[in-house]
Image (cartoon, rainbow, N blue to C red):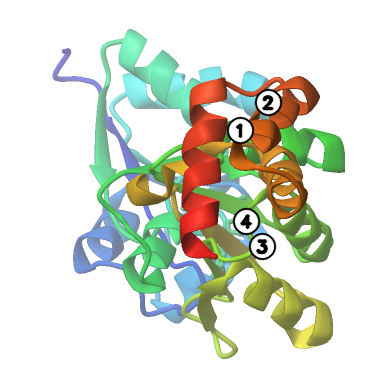
Amino acid sequence: MSNNNGILYIVATPIGHLADISIRALEVLSSVNLIAAEDTRNSKVLLKHHSIKTPMTAYHDHNEDKKRQVLINRLQEGESIALISDAGTPLINDPGYSLVRHVKQAGIQVVPIPGCCALIVALSAAGLATDRFSFEGFAPRTSGARKAMFESHRLEQKTLVLYESSHRILKCMEDIKAVYEPARLMSIARELTKTYETISTGSVDELYERVATDSNMQRGEFVVLIEGIDKKQQYEGLPKEALDTLKILLSECSLKTAVKLALELTGQPKKELYKAALKINDSD
Ligand code: SAM
């Protein structure tokens, strides 16, 4: 790495509360030559709050191809630059990936200045398993794509974490309710670190009711978390429709016949259907 190059700092900023920023982040933002911000008007509020007067330039999805080389040239001239986004950690569902990649390819040092990230903040207080999780970014926009995504995660033992907007939170909950068992544990982390912060944890059924019946629960910014499947509940690893079919058949026929018919109707593995049938009968 050339000593003449400046450094690109990737600086995490608050996701709501303006005080949620590290001392090191404030020092870096004050001392660099330039701050590349996703939205300079938005970041002005943060910088003003912390009395930081460093010049800013816009760096966002729509100008990144043009702007990238300009920033790299300045780094090669020895200037240091801090990249920030509107909220939280840059690059996490925010611009910056191609900049970091190209900057590293140019042999310029990239230094992360860690801090807030909505998905981690949500996980830390939701009360769901955190040892393994899968972050899917923003939930797909259409119901069909969302359901397919939930279906592909339903049998995973890791917690699923998603970002969702206020426009789609209710529709997203409808799809969760359609795919997951009613008792599956989930959380909705809303307006984290802000005045109306709400972190609700409960069953899929409970949280659907809460969102559907309380319009305040449909406002703001959301992280949606769904706990992975319980190992002991493996029989629930069958798709919801197959399990429902099996339950109806068991209420009408013998275990052997119910499994045979369920196999024909659902095409699910016989072993799983048999295991599930035994558990359902045991729990009656
Ligand atoms: N870079 C950010 C981070 O580190 O979390 C994420 C940016 S992404 C464009 C914005 C999405 O993150 C929002 O739509 C919401 O899903 C989530 N988010 C950001 N701030 C949040 C907050 N205060 N409370 C809940 N979710 C938040």
SS state under label 4: loop
Is the CB of mark 2 within 8 Å of ligand 1?
Answer: no
Decide: is 167 above or below 113.
below
Q: Dot 1 surroundings within 10 Å: few (below 14), some, or many (20 or more)?
A: few
Q: What residue is rendered at 60% in x and 26% in y?
A: 67
Label 4 CB-ligand 1 distance < 8 A: no
Residue on which disc 3 sits: 41
Q: Tell me the kind of residue under disc 4.
A: Glu
Residue annotated with mark 4: 181
Of helix, strand and loop, which one carries label 3?
helix
Are there few (<14), some (14-19), or many (20+) residues within 10 Å of tag 3?
A: few
Q: Which element carries disc 2, helix, strand or loop?
A: helix
Mark 3 against mark 1, which lies toward the viewer? 1
User: Looking at the image, which residue is at 69% across and 24% down?
Assistant: 263
The yes-or-no answer for disc 3 within 8 Å of ligand 1 is no
CA separation, marks 3 and 4? 44 Å
Instruction: Give the amino acid at mark 2.
Output: Lys
Which is nearer the N-term, disc 3 or disc 2?
3
> Which one is in front in this view, the residue at disc 4 or the one at disc 2?
2
Q: Alpha carbon of mark 3 to alpha carbon of mark 1: how far?
A: 67 Å
- Whether the residues at callouts 4 and 2 have beta carbons within 8 Å, the answer is no
- Residue 122 on image: x %, y %: 43, 65
Mark 1 or 4, closer to the camera: 1
Question: In which quadrant of the rendered view does residue 75 lie?
Answer: top left
Q: Which mark is residue 260?
A: 2
Q: Nearer the viewer, residue 220 or 213?
A: 213
Q: Are marks 2 and 1 in contact (CB under 8 Å)?
A: yes
> In this orientation, which residue lies closer to the viewer: 13 or 93?
93
Where does the C terminus fall, quadrant-wise? bottom right
| Residue on which the image places disc 1 | 256
Closer to us: 168 or 24? 168
